[in-house]
Image (cartoon, helix red, strand yellow):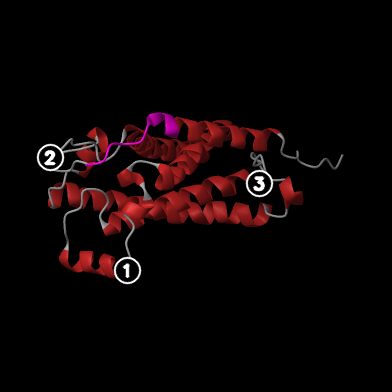
């Protein structure tokens, strides 16, 4: 039997781009570097949508159907624990929650306006009907996302050093110890194709979005 990586290269690359990208987004937002903030946001949004797509057409352990479980199994895991090759039930929930919040953060940013230094590229689409809602949600969602990120990091630290489960090594190398996959990963070209399509769609939407109305 051939042992394959639990986490294929595209999944690992996207995963490690997230902490770097979110950190840069935080820094650029706090320091007012909004043009750079926008470019990083476009890259992150492309990666998030690509990762969500891999949840349906990616490698075995990257697919949602192969790691999301029902409430009963989550409760059983909390009570009894257990070993999992891929995401455990709590890790699965955390993964989906983080991806959802990052998607919401990126999309809301596209429609946001701060009245000072930034107009989202799609803010004036749909006659600007979503500006207020998107702007408010962009700030609120960031608070929720930041809290979940800290919780996620705390959980990783707990599993890594308290329970001696090498999660970091597994996500870096794709496998570790007895954490190996039995199914071959899908072609990396599939991920690249998805990312290119997502990036091109985003570029077209931004390029042909309505500009801010002029009152002068």
The residue shown at (29%, 58%) is 90
Which image quarter: residue 77? bottom left
Q: Is residue 87 above or below residue 187?
A: below
Q: Give the residue at mark 2.
A: 177
At mark 1, the secondary structure is helix
Number of residues whose C-alpha sits closer than 10 Å to that of mark 3, classed few (under 14), some (14–19) or many (20 or more): many
The residue shown at (32%, 68%) is 71
Mark 1 or 3: in front is 1
**Residue 126 visible in the current orientation:** yes
Q: Is residue 108 above or below residue 15?
A: below
Q: Is residue 76 above or below residue 4?
A: below
The residue shown at (38%, 30%) is 188
**Location of residue 199 in the rendering, given as x and y in whole percent from the top left corner:** 55, 33
Number of residues whose C-alpha sits closer than 10 Å to that of mark 1, classed few (under 14), some (14–19) or many (20 or more): few
Q: Give the residue at mark 1.
A: 71
Left-right relation of 89 to 189? left
Q: Nearer the viewer, residue 168 or 54?
A: 54
Overall secondary structure of the magenta section: loop
Mark 2 or 3: in front is 2
The numbered mark at residue 113 is 3
Per the rendered image, the range of residues in magenta is 182-190
**Location of residue 158 in the rendering, given as x and y in whole percent from the top left corner:** 19, 52
Quadrant location, the C terminus: top right
Left-right relation of 19 to 183? right
């Amino acid at each position: 039997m051939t042992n394959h990586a639990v986490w294929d290269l595209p999944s690992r690359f996207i995963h490690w781009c997230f902490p770097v990208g979110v950190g840069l987004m935080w820094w650029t937002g706090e320091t007012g570097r909004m043009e750079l903030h926008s470019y990083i946001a476009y890259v992150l949004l492309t990666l998030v949508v690509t990762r969500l797509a891999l949840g349906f057409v990616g490698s075995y352990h990257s697919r949602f159907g192969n790691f999301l479980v029902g409430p009963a199994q989550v409760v059983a895991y909390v009570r009894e624990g257990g070993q999992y090759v891929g995401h455990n039930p709590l890790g699965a929930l955390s993964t989906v929650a983080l991806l959802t919040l990052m998607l919401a953060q990126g999309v809301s940013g596209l429609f946001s306006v701060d009245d000072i230094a930034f107009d989202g590229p799609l803010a004036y689409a749909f006659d600007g009907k979503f500006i207020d809602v998107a702007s408010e949600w962009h700030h609120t969602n960031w608070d929720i996302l930041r809290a979940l990120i800290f919780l996620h990091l705390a959980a990783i630290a707990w599993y890594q050093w308290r329970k001696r489960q090498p999660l970091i090594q597994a996500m870096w190398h794709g496998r570790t110890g007895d954490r190996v996959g039995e199914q071959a990963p899908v072609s990396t070209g599939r991920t690249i194709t998805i990312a290119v399509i997502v990036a091109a769609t985003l570029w077209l939407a931004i390029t042909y979005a309505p500009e801010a109305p002029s009152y002068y």
